[in-house]
Image (cartoon, rainbow, N blue to C red):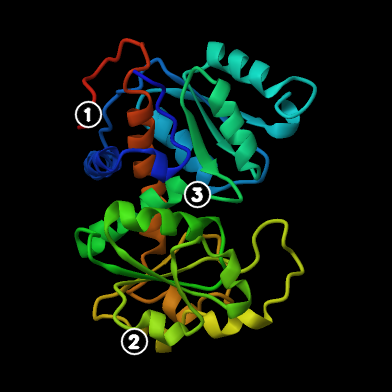
């Protein structure tokens, strides 16, 4: 069987994505007695930026399932340095069973995966954030039922998270509308529904979601054009009854969302943060299902 990387949602069969989500739900239900399906396996975690949720959730996920981790920063290793990417991939493939990498450069990550003989998982790049979107869909399903047919409205900047929502919408059958300043519409992926009218995007939405307007490395960026896209009580009032608010964190208080919304009963941001853990446990199990190591407990049927 071919190596199961988890880099782009569109590269994974929709049936597998749905199976991963079903297993994530199951793993969350058993979070106080997680199955030791990754007993004896090792995960290398590589970072070129500081991280709270990605590092903590992947490290706990691997350990809860019986495996263990080793963490390295990019400046501690040869990737992109004196050693070729091909050579680094070959060496890591002999030491560990999978690699989770959080880095800015997606083409470099994809090159690593090309040469790796073990799964490579995209912990985040400047282009995409697939693990976050899997956790987001898990959260939506927990609160609202099946995501198919739901309307998700995004507000603010166009970034790696919104890019991956665009990728996910046709795979999971939900409606997505991006409300962004007209000046950045050319940065929105082709085929997405985009508007400059925040109120229109919020109308009839089941989920309102945003992200920080200033990502790491963008300090000093002007926020003037984003203020009309702040998620506030007026926008929430235009959504469907029972609509939820989501944010992948960290938040810039109180820029992209008001305190009133972020701390309201509609806010599920900490459920969303926890669900990184459970979604990533399922992703790890799917990637490592055929790792060639004798597992102590039976795995999940990803069919």
Q: Which mark is residue 207?
A: none
- In the picture of the structure, the residue carrying the numbered disc 2 is 238
The local secondary structure at tag 1 comes to loop
- Position of residue 237 relative to residue 47, above or below, is below
The quarter holding residue 9 reads top left
Q: CA distance from mark 3 to mark 2?
A: 28 Å
Residue at 42 percent of width and 86 percent of height: 199
- Contact between marks 3 and 1 (CB within 8 A): the answer is no
State left or right for residue 248 relative to residue 52. left
Q: Give x and y (percent) for residue 250.
A: 55, 60
- In the picture of the structure, the residue carrying the numbered disc 1 is 300
Q: Give x and y (percent) for residue 155.
A: 48, 74
- Position of residue 47 relative to residue 163, above or below, is above
The local secondary structure at tag 3 comes to loop
Few, some or many residues within 10 Å of mark 2 (<14, 14–19, 20+) = some
The quarter holding residue 104 reads top right
Q: Earlier in the sequence, mark 2 or mark 1?
A: 2
């Amino acid at each position: 069987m071919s190596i199961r990387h988890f880099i782009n949602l569109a590269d994974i069969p929709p049936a597998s994505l749905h199976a991963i989500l079903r297993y994530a739900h199951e793993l969350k239900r058993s979070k106080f007695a997680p199955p030791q399906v990754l007993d004896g396996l090792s995960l290398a975690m590589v970072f070129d930026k500081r991280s709270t949720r990605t590092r903590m959730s992947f490290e706990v996920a691997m350990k809860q399932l019986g495996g263990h981790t080793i963490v390295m920063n990019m400046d501690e290793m040869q990737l992109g340095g004196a050693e070729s990417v091909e050579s680094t991939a070959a060496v890591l493939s002999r030491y560990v069973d999978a690699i989770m990498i959080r880095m800015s450069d997606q083409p470099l990550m994809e090159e690593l995966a090309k040469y790796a003989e073990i799964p490579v998982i995209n912990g985040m790049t400047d282009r995409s954030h697939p693990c976050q979107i899997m956790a987001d869909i898990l959260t939506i399903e927990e609160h609202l039922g099946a995501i198919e047919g739901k309307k998700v409205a995004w507000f603010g900047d166009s970034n790696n998270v919104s890019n991956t929502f665009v990728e996910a919408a046709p795979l999971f059958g939900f409606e997505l509308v991006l409300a962004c300043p007209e000046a950045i519409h050319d940065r929105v992926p082709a085929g997405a529904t985009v508007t400059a009218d925040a109120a229109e995007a919020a109308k009839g939405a089941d989920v309102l979601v945003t992200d920080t307007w200033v990502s790491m490395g963008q300090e000093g960026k002007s926020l003037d054009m984003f203020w009309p896209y702040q998620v506030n009580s007026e926008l929430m009032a235009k959504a469907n009854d029972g609509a939820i608010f989501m944010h992948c964190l960290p938040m810039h208080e109180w820029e992209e969302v008001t305190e009133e919304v972020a701390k309201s009963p509609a806010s599920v941001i900490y459920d969303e943060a926890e669900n990184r853990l459970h979604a990533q446990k399922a992703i790890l199990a799917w990637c490592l299902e055929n790792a060639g190591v004798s597992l102590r407990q039976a795995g999940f049927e990803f069919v």
